[in-house]
Image (tube, coloured by chain):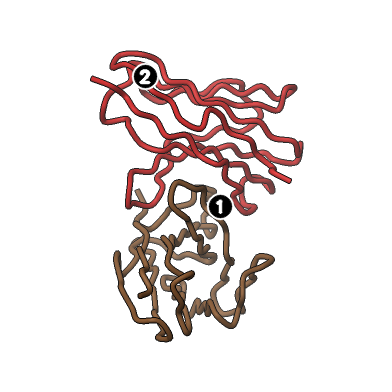
Amino acid sequence: GAVVSQHPSRVICKSGTSVKIECRSLDFQATTMFWYRQFPKKSLMLMATSNEGSKATYEQGVEKDKFLINHASLTLSTLTVTSAHPEDSSFYICSARDRGRGRTEAFFGQGTRLTVV
Amino acid sequence: QQQVKQSPQSLIVQKGGISIINCAYENTAFDYFPWYQQFPGKGPALLIAIRPDVSEKKEGRFTISFNKSAKQFSLHIMDSQPGDSATYFCAVSDLGGQGNLIFGKGTKLSVKP
């Protein structure tokens, strides 16, 4: 099946610094990628949807200046958490759909555990 | 307003038993109903999905039952195994399944040996 690779799987950063998380579709072109945030023992909350070559669409309550999303190519989207604070500590997951072939299945990355100290 | 309600929150089943997780939705525009399995520290993985034109879909030990009139769908895991212990999420989507996925709150399944 299709593979979505997310990197890094874990990152610890100091408060006030920025962290970049990469999401790559390895064997298909992802015209649309999604970024989710998941708190412990909770469901996935959609943060934003990014389409290749255009600005991301953010869900209500998500700060676009804090969570910068770039979908520069059909196989790569990045999420940058800027000026990170301890409350940004969470599990971040990306997802991609191969809509070019009309596939509806969403493939998820393995997630990134961000800890801000 | 919660668009998809999932129950139970947690479930303990003996090895070999049947695990049943239920989801209910309100919006009749939803037309794609997937179930995801998530292990700790990993991203979700699609288990099985159904569209509203069928009432049941089976893949191996996993079966989705869909009741369009009741706006409910459920996941049945037959012959549950300890390796099935994970968190399961139902989701809904519209636009032929190309809309954004909306997830239930999850069910933590523990299968005891």
Residue A49: which disc? Answer: none
Return the residue found at the far top: B17
For disc 2, the neighbor class at 10 Å (few under 14, some 14 to 19, many from 20) is some
The quadrant holding residue B6 is top right
Instruction: State the CA–CA distance, disc 2 to disc 1.
Output: 38 Å
Instruction: Say which residue appears at 56% left-offset and 79% top-offset.
Output: A53
| B96 w.r.t. A91: above or below | above
Q: Is mark 2 on a helix, strand or loop?
A: strand
Residue A102: which disc? Answer: 1
x, y percentage for residue A85? 46, 77
Which chain corresponds to the colour red? B
Instruction: Say which residue appears at 75% left-offset and 22% top-offset.
Output: B69
x, y percentage for residue A2? 37, 53
x, y percentage for residue B63? 47, 22
| A4 w.r.t. B109: above or below | below
Name the residue nearer the viewer: B12 or A67.
B12
Which chain corresponds to the colour brown? A
x, y percentage for residue B107? 47, 34
Residue B109 in the figure: left or right of residue B3: left
Instruction: Say which residue appears at 69% left-offset and 43% top-offset.
Output: B2
Name the residue nearer the viewer: A26 or A16.
A16
The C terminus of chain A lies in quadrant: bottom left
* Dot 1 amino acid type: Gly
Residue B13: which disc? Answer: 2
Name the residue nearer the viewer: A8 or B2.
B2
* Dot 2 amino acid type: Val
Q: Which of marks 2 and 1 is in front?
A: 2
